[in-house]
Amino acid sequence: MSLAARLRPITPSLTLSVSSQAKAMRAAGQPVWDLSAGEPDFDTPEAIKAAAKLALDRGMTKYGPAAGLPELRAALAAKLKQDNGLPYTSDQVMVTNGGKHALFNLMMVLLEAGDEAIIPSPYWVSYPEMVKLVGATPILVPTNVGHDYKITPTQLAAAITPQTKLFVLNSPGNPTGSVYTPDEIQALAAVLAQHPQVWVVSDEIYEKICYDGALHFSIAACPELYDRTLIANGFAKAYSMTGWRVGYLAGPKEVIAAATVVQGHSTSNVCTFAQSGAIAAVTGSQDCVAAMTAAFAERREAIYARVHAIPGLICPKPTGAFYLFPDISALGIDSQTFCAKLLQEEGVALVPGIAFGADTNIRLSYATDRQTIDEACDRLHQFVLRQSRS
Ligand code: GLU
């Protein structure tokens, strides 16, 4: 069989494959302590589910507009104003099949062969693969733990070439949990201001999940970049709606219109009754978001204390998202071997850092219950002690 050449450089999503492997093992009756996917364990809040059920009962089972239900687009524009202080009209916002699809849409409309996209590394697994899928070239810029895994303005300036078309910014970040301060964002914006050909995508899917006083700040709030920033966001993480597949893209009208054309020929529209649930999520009480974030904050303390106590793992304490990203290089094992052995010997599922461009790290998601976290950490501790002895 000959597949299209565009697939050749693409690797499958390791976050999804490790998570499905863990789920399949559990379904087969094997005990698994799953800290792999970034998937909140909470049920979707009742009011959101009720709105979707009501929509179904009212017959909302037909096609909808490709860019999303007008009421949801208006509600998202209002959210961007209220939460982020950003002025968007409804026609600057489109509803997508999850945050991932918002990113894919914008890459389809902005990038082509010969274009470069700058991605700070470690990065979320799908960014480079999406860039390659649309024929462009990912330019990975290594960051380090000493600088909280954040790209510096000097690094950004050095990476920009006449071919640079896109800069990918993810704060709070997956897998590192780093949150850029407003000053750091402004310093990056000052560099980008010198290069008018460069677009910015700001992946803000973890915006609600910050700790220790860290605050999410959107680069679109820098006036010099508002006109060339695309915000990608979604409902999965903040409202525990991973399976609903509702996300959104906000930015200049022309880009949103072009992305709507792509969506019109690829997915038609996001499931209409799922959009009704999303309307309830964004317009209803935000207490559910606060409650889930408070639970993540407690779990973060617990998991950090336990992982920090494991000799040989170097683990900064992140201020955002729900991941720890410890360095395992002292153990002399690559991340895939480490995670495969850990799953086999202890039944603990983690994502190898290689998925995120860092083969010296492992990613633990703490979007799960305390019991799972505690048991997984005990087992991880024993496993690491065995590696250090062998
Ligand atoms: N974004 C989540 C993660 O990194 C979910 C899986 C995925 O979409 O990659 O685990």
Image: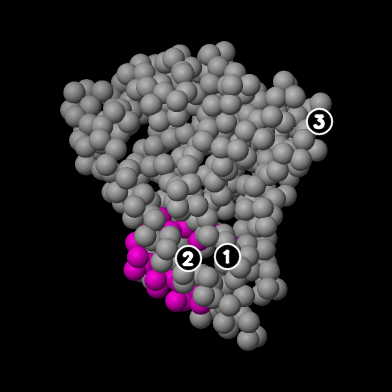
| Sequence-earlier tag: 3 or 1 | 3
Residues 60 and 221: in front is 221
Residue for badge 2 = 304
Query: Percent x, y for residue 264?
Result: 49, 18
Circle 3 residues within 10 Å: few <14, some 14–19, many ≥20: few
Disc 1 CB within 8 Å of nearest ligand 1 atom: no
User: Residue sitting at 28 percent across and 24 percent down?
Assistant: 61
The answer to whether marks 3 and 2 mark residues whose Cβ atoms lie closer than 8 Å is: no
Residue for badge 3 = 161
Residues 326 and 362: in front is 326
User: Residue sitting at 62 percent across and 53 percent down?
Assistant: 148
Real-space CA distance between mark 3 and mark 2, rounded to the nearest whole angstrom: 39 Å
Give residue 358's quadrant in the image.
bottom right
Give residue 35's quadrant in the image.
bottom left
What's under tag 3, amino acid-wise?
Thr
Image height check: is 310 above or below 57? Answer: below
What's under tag 1, amino acid-wise?
Cys
Residue for badge 1 = 315
